């Protein structure tokens, strides 16, 4: 009979962990052993991490990190950190399946820029975090690895597309995690698993290398963590200009490695709610989110309802066109070949077909609407410092439901309409961070997490992180742990 598991002990915050490793108060081997033991115990229940590497090889790499520290060699901010890059971003030597059976055996020969930076900073890659096929949909399931389950209740979904990353974080399998976000893929799973996920400003984290780097301006890569400080620590490694990424922002990530303490009194918060009734919400979502807003009062901030004067139906149409354009451009070759088209999930085929029917005039009209939306939000920022929205329109779905056909009594006309709440920051290129809002008290979803989107001015990633840090200190549920961690 195996020994009972040891009582749960949370991993330290990323900054403290890095300092302990570099002062040799904790060895990289000990950290790796802790993470591997937690993966071994919990991952079979939730399927967050896939393509796991041999434990003996991970311990060998941890020993090499310890030897480097013993020699006094300079090391990066993630030295000895176990990480699992999202199975969507190229990582040399590991499978990069993108959740698709078409690429189930693909091993990329190169790193994406962001992964290259993680590796250079000293991270050890223990595997990959699971993602839906091609990152499409806010529910992490695929035919290659199966379904990732919620960290608070495995009967429910983890969200997506960075669902594996969020669950691995919530269950302390990893110190920090990377993700990517087009339609809430860093924000929805963070909210559904009671962690933090930052969609950074467009260009903050350089993308590439890739076949097209000028027009793809909806998706981005970014950091996730159990605290805003952890998110900032990882962003300090991910961020910074790279000439290979033509839209990347100037500067480096050094500012994000500094403490986040700041004076927040007097900050003005706009509560966008359900956009004046435009967005359907499941029962209990708005009540929980509005109840959470009182914690801004604790920080000395003011909250007022505000809805941008905009045609939200036109905004959704623009989103469909721009997203279809991007997805079709990336995947149309697979759709054109009957052999690979048969392996694509229906939602991927639908996106490609939508994109292929677009006219140049329709695409230009979508770009104009997007520009008008950006201008409307700039006007709102003349009166407010931050905008706040719910991070999702529904509580975590049952794990076997691919997407809800109805929300708040309203039929969903696409597979992703139920995540419309996330498109505003994506279209405007604004920094937006999922912050915990508490837990559902409703029957059927009781005890499941929900979050808010904290949205900042253009380029104000650091301001968003500072406000989130204050929030983390103010809310009473910040450090509540998953029941799975407390089971013996």
Image: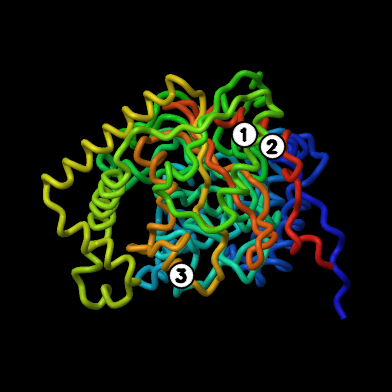
Label 1 sits on a secondary structure element that is helix
The residue carrying mark 2 is: 472
The local crowd at label 1, few if under 14, some if 14 to 19, many if 20 or more residues have their Cα within 10 Å, is many
Coloring scheme of the render? rainbow
**Residue 328 appears left or right of 474:** left
What label does residue 402 carry, if any? 3
Of residue 472 and residue 31, the one placed in the foreground of this image is 472
Q: Is residue 71 visible?
A: no
Q: CA distance from mark 2 to mark 3?
A: 32 Å
Of residue 253 and residue 10, the one placed in the foreground of this image is 10
Point out residue 36 in the picture as x, y percentages from the top left corner: 71, 61
* Marks 1 and 3, the one that precedes in the sequence: 3
Label 2 sits on a secondary structure element that is helix
**Residue 361 appears left or right of 202:** left
What label does residue 468 carry, if any? 1
* Marks 2 and 3, the one that precedes in the sequence: 3
Point out residue 252 in the picture as x, y percentages from the top left corner: 49, 26
Q: CA distance from mark 1 to mark 3?
A: 31 Å
Q: Is residue 470 above or below residue 66?
A: above
Residue drawn at x 78%, y 34% as measured from the top left: 23
Label 3 sits on a secondary structure element that is loop
């Amino acid at each position: 009979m195996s020994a009972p598991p040891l009582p749960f002990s949370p991993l330290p915050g990323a900054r403290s962990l890095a300092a302990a490793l570099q002062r040799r108060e904790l060895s990289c081997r000990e950290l790796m052993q802790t993470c591997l033991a937690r993966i071994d115990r919990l991952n079979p229940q939730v399927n967050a991490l896939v393509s796991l590497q041999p434990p003996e090889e991970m311990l060998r790499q941890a020993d090499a990190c310890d030897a480097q520290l013993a020699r006094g060699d300079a090391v990066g901010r993630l030295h000895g950190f176990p990480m699992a890059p999202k199975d969507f971003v190229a990582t040399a030597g590991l499978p990069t399946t993108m959740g698709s059976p078409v690429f189930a055996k693909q091993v990329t020969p190169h790193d994406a820029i962001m992964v290259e930076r993680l590796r250079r900073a000293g991270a050890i890659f223990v595997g990959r975090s699971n993602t839906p096929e091609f990152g499409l949909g806010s529910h992490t399931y695929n035919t290659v690895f199966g379904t990732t389950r919620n960290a608070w209740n495995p009967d429910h979904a983890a969200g997506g597309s960075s669902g594996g990353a969020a669950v691995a974080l919530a269950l302390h399998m990893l110190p920090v995690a990377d993700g990517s976000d087009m339609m809430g893929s860093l924000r929805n799973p963070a909210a559904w698993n009671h962690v933090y996920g930052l969609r950074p400003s467009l260009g903050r984290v350089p993308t590439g290398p890739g076949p097209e780097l000028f027009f793809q301006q909806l998706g981005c890569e970014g950091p996730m963590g159990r605290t805003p400080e952890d998110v900032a620590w990882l962003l300090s490694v991910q961020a910074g200009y790279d000439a290979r990424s033509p839209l990347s922002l100037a500067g480096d990530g050094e500012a994000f490695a500094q403490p986040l303490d700041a004076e927040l009194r007097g900050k003005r918060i706009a509560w966008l709610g359900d956009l004046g009734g435009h967005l359907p919400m499941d029962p209990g979502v708005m009540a929980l989110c509005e109840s959470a807003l009182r914690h801004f009062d604790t920080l000395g901030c003011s909250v007022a309802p505000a809805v941008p004067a905009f045609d939200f139906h036109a905004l959704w149409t623009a989103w469909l066109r721009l997203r279809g354009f991007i997805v079709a451009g990336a995947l149309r070759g697979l759709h054109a070949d009957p052999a690979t088209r048969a392996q694509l999930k229906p939602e991927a085929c639908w996106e490609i077909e939508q994109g292929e029917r677009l006219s140049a005039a329709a695409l230009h009209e979508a770009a104009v609407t997007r520009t008008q939306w950006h201008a409307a939000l700039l006007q709102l920022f003349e009166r407010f410092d931050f905008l706040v929205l719910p991070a999702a329109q529904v509580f975590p779905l049952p794990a076997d439901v691919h997407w809800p056909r109805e929300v708040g009594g309203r039929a969903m006309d696409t597979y992703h309409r139920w995540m419309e709440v996330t498109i505003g920051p994506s279209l405007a290129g604004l920094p937006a961070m999922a912050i915990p809002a508490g837990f559902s008290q409703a029957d059927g979803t009781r005890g499941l997490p929900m979050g808010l989107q904290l949205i900042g001015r253009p380029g104000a990633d650091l301001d968003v992180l500072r406000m989130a840090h204050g929030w983390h200190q103010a809310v009473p549920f910040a450090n509540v742990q998953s029941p799975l961690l407390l089971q013996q």
